[in-house]
Amino acid sequence: MKDENDLLIAKVLDKKKICNSKNKITYTDFLNEKEQRVIEKNVKLENAFFYGVNENADRKILVFYPEKLTEELVRKSLKSVLSGIRIILKNDQIGNYEHKNYLSALIKIGIDRGKIGDILVDDYGADIIAFDMNKEFIIQSLSELTRFRKANIDIIPIDDIKQKIDRFEESTIIVSSMRIDNIVAELAGCSRTNADEYINSEKVFVNYETALKVSKTIFEGDIVTIRGKGKFRIDGLVRNTRNNRFVIKVNKYA
């Protein structure tokens, strides 16, 4: 994990160096939330910002720009860097495709995950955020897949991309303490022993950072991700039970 982070940081620093030495806008591939957090902790981000079209996007590029430019001007220039690809399903396909169907299709045609931003899905299709240079290849390749042969696939400006709406499944859990092992056991529906195994196997993340200790304390507002089980937002204490256990409100990202 450390080697992966070091490689990521090195690549980002290289983009920053090119921006400063050549006085030009540079940007990374799309980064997931964990990668964004690593960069925020390890790279000084002056004259830089994360951008994913939607403000609450999960996947974003990191943009560096020269001092002579304003962030507003640079954001406008990104309209020529990124494009939207809209897939509209035919009637007999409506409601049958999920995020994983679109992602697997992109992987099948050979698109690296770093070249794709958020995939915004509804019953009628999806908007895919991608680098402008890849748009023609993506459209041509997707249209040749059986699952999308009947669909309409077009390029759209990034201003027309669907708004990202976070959807949650609300629930409550009861725990004896706010330790991560107790929380994971309830969220994953497993024993404390299995929860410890998840944590020790580095399959649990708190605010997109690997949870390294089973005794770590979880706080209101923390995001807990359990690989294979989902992502959860801890929304705070609802009440205490008579035997002094905690009833915690949890929102699972749908």
Image (cartoon, helix red, strand yellow):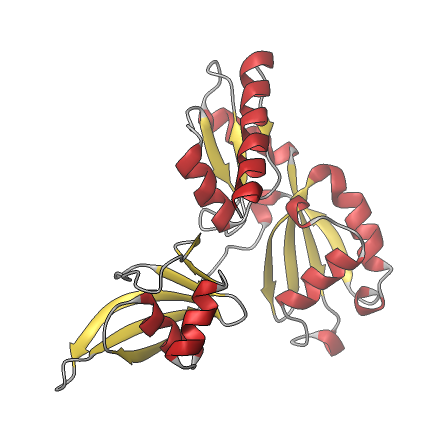
Q: Is residue 80 above or below residue 217?
A: above
Where residue 249 sits: x, y (%)? Answer: 28, 73
Q: Is residue 12 above or below residue 212?
A: above
Left of 216 or right of it: where is 11? right
Which residue sits at x=74%, y=56%? 106
Residue 221 is drawn in which quadrant? bottom left
Q: Is residue 166 above or below residue 10?
A: below
Q: Which of the 4 image quadrants contains residue 149?
A: bottom right
Q: Position of residue 178 (x, y in %)?
A: 25, 68
**In which quarter of the view is residue 121 placed?**
bottom right
Q: Is 112 or 3 nearer to us in this picture?
A: 3
Residue at position x 35%, y 70% in the image: 181
Report the residue at 59% width, 19% height from top. 18
Q: Looking at the picture, how far across and down is residue 55, in whole percent?
A: 45, 46
List x then y, in percent, for residue 170: 36, 75
Position of residue 235 in the picture relative to residue 50 (left or right) = left
